[in-house]
Amino acid sequence: MIARGIKKVHLQTLVKCKFACYSCRYSLQTVKSEYTLPKNYRKMTQDEVDDESRITVNEVIPLIATIDVGTTSSRAILFNRLGQEVAKHQIEYSTSASKEKYAASGKRRFALDDENQPIFSAEGIAISENEFLEIEDLLIKEREPTLRFPRPGWVECKPLNILVHVVECLSKTLSFVYSVNEERIASGLAPYKIHCMGLANMRETTLVWSKKTGLPVVDYGIVWNDTRNAQIVTDKRNTTSEEQQARLRDKTGLPLYSTYFSCSKLRWFLDNVSEVKKCYEENDLMFGTVDSWLIYHLTSSRAFVSDVTNASRTGFMNLDTLDYDDELLNYWGIDRKKINLPKIVSSAEYYGDFQVPKCIKSYLLASDWKLLSDFSNRNPPVPLQGCLGDQSASLVGQLAFKPGSAKCTYGTGCFLLYNTGSKKLISQHGALTTFGYWFPNLDGVEESKPHFALEGSVAVAGAVVQWLRDNLRLIPKAEDVGPLASRVPDSGGVVFVPAFSGLFAPYWDPDARATVMGMSQFTTASHIARAAVEGVCFQARAILKAMSSDAAGAKDKDKDFFEEVVDGTYEKSLLSTLAVDGGMSRSDEVMKIQADILGPCIKVRRSPTHECTALGAAIAAEMAFKDPAERMMWRDLSDVKKWVFYNGLDKGEQPADYVKPDLKIFRSTSSDKERRQKWKLWEVAVERSRGWLAATKEIEQDESGSSSKMTNSHD
């Protein structure tokens, strides 16, 4: 357990610091190793004691447990009413420590046998093991890693590993809270108590398991960024009329021929894996994304469901009916009678009571099994009742509830969502249509309806920083890119299009490749670093421009929508604030560059929490209670903002410095002329980077043909 080995005096220190939570001003690791009071230790003032009493309900401080499964890690986080992390545990399973020396973004540069070299997360952040973070390959040596890369373009995950990691992370957070509660009670403070659970997960990842056994049919799932299904989608495109393409796209909101979505991944399973085909023919096959797999195994009733934000990414769901569509299933050759599909549900409703799954008992320590079994049998039981796909969860966690709100998450790639409220907009400018969230138990007709969003993604964001670090060796750490880029006032005419694996929205050109243009002998490392950062920021601007154009186009068809969006923003515009989170957003220099590229009409607001995705799932779980009186943390979405952003104070009241959220606003100081010139250069560079892969293939074919003719002539 995490905290049991720490001497009593140190747990008392934890108890008396601000909210005794994970986000203390010092770490448990420091306390445990030094066995002395931290230098910045101080007792809680009376004001702080009184402040803590404000988040106490029925003599306990309620918490929400969130499970957050990403592409490269699993974590469990416990949030309090202020949106603070009270406890957190993470297992990172895609690092340079991998047995295969690979991660989601490609090959790493460090050798396994060099213990002095740092280990990097998928976002390029240097990490090391501690009480809150474990690295899979250092933790479990007898099992295969959760992520594997058997062939170029293939990315697989092990469903059982994910389930084990989730449960282990939850066990560690429970152990920490139970230990701290002993000391809190002894000190006369209210204990913590988990009153519900939520889930956030990577989307589109395709899993298949047996209805009879509950276990995977094959020991892997196909991850969202796997491209083995490329030929399947190409063949479909070549045999489908434009009229049918438009009709199907209107139903799904998705581009039919992207390798991302679950429909073609399931088709690949059926066409290429005999075990899956056999299970399908016997009506024993269960299909689902990560949310369905986890909810099925973590609920006592074995609920087989998928929320709309995940189901809408399968390619089988009709956005209007909120159900599977026979035409879509038939298009991909799926017989509804032969397959078990999860019921499509809202993002905030009761799915079932938590139960530790027996199928993974052998993988857990006896102490963890005992702790989780006791938690499963708690009276009243703990409901699992909130679920969102990761990008939708981030939108909610950024508190971007109003139509016209937008968020951008800077990870390995970059994901932008624009909230369009209850209006479904089919983009005419390269964005996708998806669900933001659906909280049916909220008061108000509009509030309780499913909320749509336009979505755009940038293939490369943090990955370009890793490339600067690992390939060019321009920086030793990812965090150094901002200071390096800021040494120069501009890129010196250099434009960097980071299309390492093609261009995503709004360009959608898989044949594009990365280009660096405009270099001269004047060019320095700082110019290249700045151009790389600007390349990410320009792509974000292109997506926001496309989304704003879609929204503007909707005003002629739906004036109510236009007025709703404009009235919901302070600047009375279609887009006024971009809420940001993720790795690159932590750099002030990078966010200032982003603000300058966007211009004065849009302010960039950095989230007060680094864990927006997990917080979004916690909010969904709380909104699942039908009776507002049961919502111990937040009554409604306005109440969420009041507590998370303003410490529970009403408008006009100023929170104390020690609890004021770490919000930061970035505004543009660039001139219109400078901004227009840079944008035109960017568009020229994008145009010249497009079609590169197709051109090289044509050249290879021409050369092959020429060689053949010469050989025949010689004969």
Image (cartoon, rainbow, N blue to C red):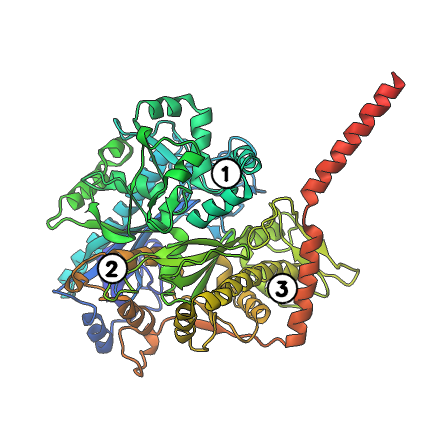
Q: Check disc 1 and report the residue beneath it.
A: 226
N-term mark: 1 or 2: 1
Judge the density around disc 1: few (<14), some (14-19), many (≥20) Cα neighbours within 10 Å: many
Q: Is residue 17 visible?
A: no
Vertical side of 47 occupied by 396: above or below? above
Residue 630 left/right relative to 404: left
Q: Nearer the viewer, mark 3 or mark 1?
A: 1
Which residue is rendered at x = 29% and y = 70% of the image? 638
Which residue is rendered at x = 69% and y = 54% of the image? 687
State the image coordinates of residue 318 (x, y, percent, origin top left): 38, 47
State the image coordinates of residue 274 (x, y, percent, origin top left): 41, 21
Amino acid on which disc 2 is placed? Met
> Relative to the observer, which residue lies in front, 337 or 609?
337
Q: How many marks?
A: 3
Judge the density around disc 3: few (<14), some (14-19), many (≥20) Cα neighbours within 10 Å: many
Please give the label number shown on residue 485: 3
N-term mark: 3 or 1: 1
Q: Nearer the viewer, mark 2 or mark 3?
A: 2
Quarter holding residue 373: top left
State the image coordinates of residue 35 (x, y, percent, origin top left): 31, 57
- Identify the element where label 1 is drawn: loop
**What is the C-alpha distance between the residues marked 1 and 2?**
34 Å
State yes or no: discs 2 and 3 in contact (Cβ < 8 Å): no
Which residue is rendered at x = 26% and y = 27% of the image? 213
> Relative to the observer, which residue lies in front, 325 or 462?
325
Residue 375 left/right relative to 669: left
Vertical side of 190 occupied by 649: above or below? below
Amino acid on which disc 1 is placed? Asp
**What is the C-alpha distance between the residues marked 3 and 1?**
33 Å
State the image coordinates of residue 646 (x, y, percent, origin top left): 32, 74
